[in-house]
Image: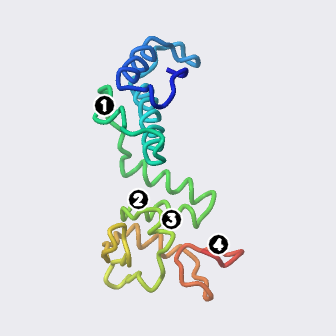
């Protein structure tokens, strides 16, 4: 479909792309192209056409309501508690602050950005909670702290000049 202009492209061309791509082989593995890879190609085409529509290069989006191939879902392996603790310990052996950060995210379910913005003022060890001031939806959230989470927080150095929990001691920056 590479020799078409934007205005010539139709959903039939997308179907042709899908069919031809499915005939190919992955050059790295020699196996047939996966449905997921074909779907990513279709998504790229669709996004390019969306961009063209926004820039008024085309009058209508030819892939509106164009379906994708059904992909086989694979069950993800979930870490056991022992696996998680071993992973956190290995990271802590390399870098205490990053290890505690990884462990606290795992224990509390905090998002990466929430962990990085966490301040000591919002950690209440007496009540065993921490407060996320502005979560993804903009609402304040109170998160319970397990014994392990409290243990990790207790290992972190506190820098007087910085209110953040996760701070690089050398730079005193969050």
Q: In terms of sequence position, does the residue under pointer 4 or pointer 2 come before the other? A: 2
The residue under label 3 is 101
Q: Which residue is mark 4?
A: 168
Q: Secondary structure at mark 1?
A: loop
In the rendered view, how is the structure colored?
rainbow
Name the residue tied to disc 1: 66
Q: N-terminal of the two: label 1 or label 2?
A: 1
- The residue nearer to you, when weighing 50 against 155, is 50
Q: Nearer the viewer, residue 136 or 106?
A: 136
Quick one: label 3 or label 2, which is nearer the N terminus?
3
What is the secondary structure assignment of the residue under circle 4? loop
Sooner in the amino-acid sequence: mark 1 or mark 4:
1
Q: Mark 3 or mark 1, which is nearer the start of the sequence?
A: 1
Image location of residue 133, percent across then percent down? 38, 78
Q: CA distance from mark 1 to mark 4?
A: 49 Å
Q: Mark 1 or mark 3, which is nearer to you?
A: 1
Secondary structure beneath disc 3?
helix
Q: Residue at x 49, y 76 (%)?
A: 154
Cα distance in 3D space between marks 1 and 2: 38 Å
The location of residue 54, given as percent across then percent down, is 44, 48
């Amino acid at each position: 479909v590479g020799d078409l202009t934007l205005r010539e492209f139709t959903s039939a061309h997308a179907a042709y792309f899908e069919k031809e791509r499915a005939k190919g082989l992955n050059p790295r593995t020699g196996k047939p192209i996966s449905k997921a890879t074909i779907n990513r190609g279709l998504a790229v085409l669709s996004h390019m056409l969306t961009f063209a529509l926004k820039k008024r290069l085309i009058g209508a989006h030819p892939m509106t309501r164009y379906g994708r191939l059904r992909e086989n879902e694979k069950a993800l392996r979930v870490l056991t508690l022992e696996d998680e603790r071993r992973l956190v310990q290995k990271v802590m052996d390399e870098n205490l602050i990053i290890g505690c950060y990884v462990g606290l995210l795992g224990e509390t379910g905090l998002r990466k950005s929430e962990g990085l913005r966490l301040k000591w003022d919002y950690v209440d060890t007496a009540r065993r909670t921490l407060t996320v001031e502005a979560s993804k939806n903009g609402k304040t959230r109170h998160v319970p702290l397990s014994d392990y989470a409290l243990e990790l927080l207790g290992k972190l150095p506190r820098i007087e000049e910085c209110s953040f929990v996760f701070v690089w001691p050398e730079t005193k920056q969050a």
